[in-house]
Amino acid sequence: MVSGDSTDPTVRERAARLGRALLLGGVLAALAVPLLVLSGETLVFASEKVFAVGALVFGFSILGWSGSVFAGKGIENFQRHIGGRSDWSEADSRQAMALLGSVGLGGMVGAMAATLVVGGLA
Amino acid sequence: MISKRFVVKRLLLLVPVLFGVATFVFAILHLAPGDPARVIAGQRASEQFVQQVRTELGLNDPIWVQYGRFLLEAAQFDFGNSYQIQKGTPVKQVLRFKLPVTLEMALFGQFLGILFGIPIGLLGAVKQDALSDHVTRIGALTGISVPIYWSGPLLILLFAQILGWFPASGRIASEFSITPITGIITFDTLVQGNFAAFQSAAMHLFLPSVVIGIYSMALVSRMMRSSMLEVIRQDYMRTARAKGQGSRITVMKHGFQNALIPVVTVIGIQFGTLLGGAVLTETVFGIPGIGTLLVSAIQVGDYPVVQGTVLTFAFLFTLVNLLVDVTYSYLDPRIDQ
């Protein structure tokens, strides 16, 4: 997506997308923890693994986001220089990483909440 | 003139990079199989003792508490104490003695790579398609293609076993006893005025540095050649020559600095590869650096040492890239606009 394009999402739309991604991560993690417990794993194990998966996605997205900011413009210029027709852009990459990061963060929060709930019920 | 805003912006970007690496490493270590408490307590220890160790290490706390604590401590460069490699010793202290060993090797490797890579690349560009260009091109392609675990033993076989010119492993001959100042042994021996020890350290360092520098040299020379060829064809170079300036002065005065810009990037990115290559080089040459430390720490499940080592690697890599950016903007002031 080219910067300044009329199809650029507004701040509110972006926040809504991030919120939905956060919710998706949270729901997935909140389901994964009790499912692992029901399959016979301990709550500590389930909590640790689900939280760690969320953290993995979150950490990866932060690295991807900073990589895009660090080198994104350079890559765009390079593509233009070699006459490539790729649609990759720094802004798109940043937004994609922010969405992925929200899923990861949601997963971490979801794992935390699910652990507290399942622990309280047990 | 380098703008302060550019440098500050780049410095601020280091924070998310290190935060991302820290989170990533934390997650991977907690997804990996194995219980560090069991490793510390020993395989024959009772479950009660293992639980006691877990409590002491804070491993019984919820994982988000461990994550928060790890981030807080990592921000202060405190990675806790080693579980297994040097039991009870702070990781900071372990790294303090190991890091200079690897840095010394990587820096000498990089130095050799630049020392030979740039002139070879220049020669290839100036004498394009001559015999020297073909020879350096084949040399560079070989250098890029040869892996460290192959070139290392081969060099040891030739220069240590057959010719006996250089020692095969270690950092210095056993007869020398050096008090470490910086940990960079060649520097320490020079500062202490012990030239015999310096010679021994330099001889020990030569083969690992060559092994680690071959790839860098090959890449730098190829980049220098293609960049210089592009610059040589520019109008301003033709104008300088048309005005009667000698070709050597034209190349060195007008062409070299402009051709250097992409080479600087390669050198910066290369440094990260050199640090990675140190893991293999140290293993081949039996050098007790950060690379061998990382491998041992992974094998025995020493979480704090792994976390500290990876974060230090990441910090060094991002710092070098920052230096590359600053050098960039010095060579071409348009970049920081």
Image: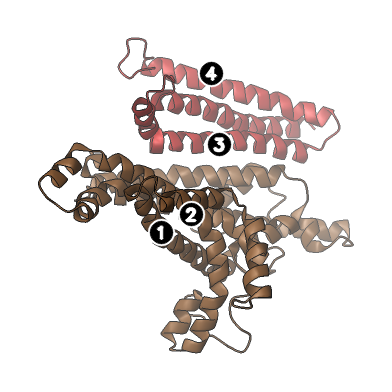
Mark 2 = which residue?
Answer: B216
Q: Please, which chain is the residue tagged with disc 4 on? A: A
Give amino acid for label 3: Phe
Res. A20 mark: 4
Q: Are marks 2 and 3 on the same chain?
A: no
Residue at horizontal 37 percent and vertical 55 percent from the top: B118
Q: Which residue is mark 3?
A: A60
Inter-mark Cα distance, 4 to 1: 50 Å
Residue B26 is labelled as none
Query: Where in the figure is residue B316, as x and y percent of width and height?
Result: 47, 55
Amino acid type for the residue under numbered disc 4: Arg
**Mark 2 → mark 3, Cα distance in angstroms:** 28 Å
* Disc 3 to disc 1, C-alpha distance: 33 Å
Residue found 17% across the figure and 54% down from its top: B246
Q: Which of the labelled discs sits on residue B114, or is there none?
A: 1
Find numbered disc 2 in the image and state the secondary structure of the residue it sits on: helix
